[in-house]
């Protein structure tokens, strides 16, 4: 790892009721970036503190948005890496390449792509709102160097700390915050995706306590907050999920053997 990555980047992880996922993620980070500073915020009912990271216990069910805002205030480095707790670093998770984008452009947020057993999840999109219909278009609105320009990327991104400390998450949204965050800052944050930076997403739903609280993003309480805020009554997604076969040539033998069994 280049020395300046650990000097300039902090990884932040909001976790809830999935200590086994968190453990897997932290071990994967330390495998590839052993000196990277990691800050965890845990609002589980019975948190299990760790001594190998900077660990903060928040009040039970504080929520994703409040947890991320708290984490962001703890960051002292110029950049931070946002991570969900059910990610795993792989050979293709290059912080250096993401940092290179920020250091050589006016881009504020640069995301990577999530690969799963079912394929590549394409979370990146361009927003349009017309007649109260939010449409997420799969194609970028532009390109700069190696990256493509979008309005929204996955919750796996590197960003400028000072810029996002001024553009925070809406703490009314304990879950279901993703669209709202990027809708709120469309035109205020310059967002890009690097098409060849990947992280593995386990999408672990094995904990029933986690599922109970996570599934609130389908309830009217949370949908109405961001829909009323942005004048939306319907959402149409034009995102594409790719087959893993489409990107096999970009994955290492280790990644393929570990996660895809061949």
Image (cartoon, rainbow, N blue to C red):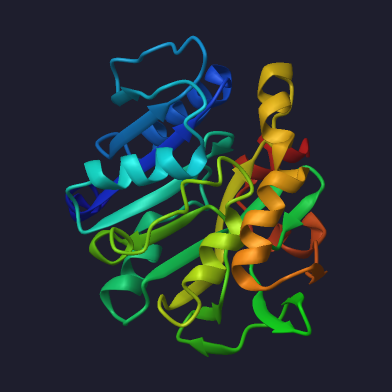
Quadrant assignment for the C terminus: top right
Q: Residue at x 49, y 74 (%)?
A: 192
Instruction: Pick whichever, 90 or 111, lies toward us.
Output: 111
Where in the figure is residue 8, as x and y percent of width and height?
20, 54
Task: Between residue 225 and residue 200, name the one nearer to us.
Answer: 225
Q: What percent of the width, then of the height, locates residue 142? A: 56, 90
Is residue 174 visible in the rendered structure shown here?
yes
Q: Is residue 56 above or below residue 179?
A: above
Q: Establish if 195 lies above or below 80.
A: below
Describe residue 3's horizontal placement relative to residue 210 as left or right.
left
Side of 205 relative to 182 (left or right): right
Q: Find residue 95 and report its image quarter.
A: bottom left
Q: Residue visible at 60% across and 40% down? A: 254
Residue 123 appears anywhere in the view? no
Q: How many marks?
A: 0
Where is residue 116? Give x, y as percent: 72, 45
Judge left or right: residue 91 versus residue 69: right
Question: Left of 33 or right of it: where is 202?
Answer: right
Q: Residue at x 45, y 13 (%)?
A: 47
Q: Residue at x 80, y 62 (%)?
A: 242
Spot occupied by residue 92 in the image (x, y as percentages of width and height): 52, 53
């Amino acid at each position: 790892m280049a020395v300046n990555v650990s000097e300039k980047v902090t990884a932040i992880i909001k976790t809830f009721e999935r200590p086994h996922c968190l453990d897997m993620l932290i071990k994967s980070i330390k495998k590839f970036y052993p000196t990277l500073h990691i800050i965890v915020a845990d609002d589980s009912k019975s948190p299990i503190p760790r001594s190998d990271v900077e660990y903060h216990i928040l009040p039970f069910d504080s929520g994703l948005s409040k947890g991320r805002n708290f984490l962001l205030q703890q960051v002292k480095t110029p950049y931070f890496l946002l991570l969900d707790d059910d990610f795993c670093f792989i050979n293709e998770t290059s912080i250096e390449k993401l940092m290179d984008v920020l250091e050589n452009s006016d881009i504020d947020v640069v995301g990577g792509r999530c690969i799963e057993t079912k394929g590549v999840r394409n979370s990146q999109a361009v927003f349009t709102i017309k007649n109260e219909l939010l449409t997420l278009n799969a194609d970028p609105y532009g390109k700069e160097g190696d990256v493509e320009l979008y309005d929204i990327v996955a919750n796996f991104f590197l960003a400028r700390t000072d810029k996002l400390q001024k553009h925070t998450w809406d703490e009314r949204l304990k879950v279901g915050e993703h669209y709202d965050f990027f809708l709120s800052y469309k035109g205020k944050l310059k967002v890009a995706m690097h098409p060849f930076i990947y992280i593995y997403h386990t999408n672990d739903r094995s904990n029933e306590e986690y599922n109970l609280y996570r599934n609130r993003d389908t309830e009217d309480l949370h949908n109405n907050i961001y829909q009323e805020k942005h004048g939306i009554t319907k959402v149409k997604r034009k995102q594409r999920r790719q087959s893993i076969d489409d990107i096999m040539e970009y994955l290492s033998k280790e990644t393929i053997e570990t996660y895809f069994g061949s």
